[in-house]
Image (spheres, rainbow, N blue to C red):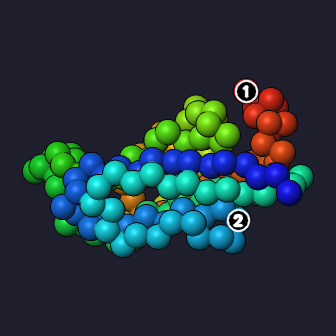
Amino acid sequence: MSTTKFSVTIAPSDPAVPLGMEVWIDSDKIFNKDHVSQTETVKHDLSDQAGEHVLRFVLKNKLRKHTQLDADKNIIKDARIRIDDITFEDINVNQLVIDHAEYQHNFNGHGTDTTEKFYGEMGCNGTVTLKFSTPIYLWLLEKM
């Protein structure tokens, strides 16, 4: 059985803040850390058998105190996780993720549930979801 290589880099904006991250492919949790204190590279081989899949990035443990506001309620400092260098078979798909992924969150419990575009950073507890299919080269051809 052939496989597809997946890789992603996860980096905290403030290593002292205990933001957590999970990475899922379908029902497989391939990464789980309660405090991402340094840049992490996650690698995983998944089956290349034809089918639909879901890639999810889950930010957890973000608290109100991890965002500093000025007197006018403008953010002056915020802890975030950067998700970068997303690859399938060593092909960078960052732009495809930006174009097709959805970021679902509720402003860390201080707002209504919302779905937004994802631009490479997660600053609220929530989930970024990307649907893709294998064989990966066919999906890449359809999306590029």
Whole-number angstrom distance, CA of label 2 to CA of label 1: 23 Å
Residue 26 left/right relative to 125? right
From the image, tell me which residue sits under label 2.
26
The answer to which of marks 2 and 1 sits earlier in the sequence is 2
Q: Residues within 10 Å of mark 2 (few under 14, many from 20)?
A: few
34 relative position to 26: left or right: left
Q: Position of residue 2 (x, y in %)?
A: 82, 52
Q: Residues within 10 Å of mark 1 (few under 14, many from 20)?
A: few
Q: Secondary structure at mark 2?
A: loop
State the residue at coordinates (36%, 72%).
Answer: 34
Q: Residue at x 72, y 57 (%)?
A: 46
What amino acid type should be assigned to the residue bearing mark 2? Asp
Q: x, y percentage for residue 38?
A: 29, 55
Horizontal side, residue 41 vs residue 79: left or right: right
Kindly check if marks 2 and 1 are in contact, taking CB atoms under 8 A apart as contact. no
Find disc 1 in the rendering and name its residue.
144
- Which of these two is toward me, 75 or 87? 87
Q: Residue at x 86, y 57 (%)?
A: 1
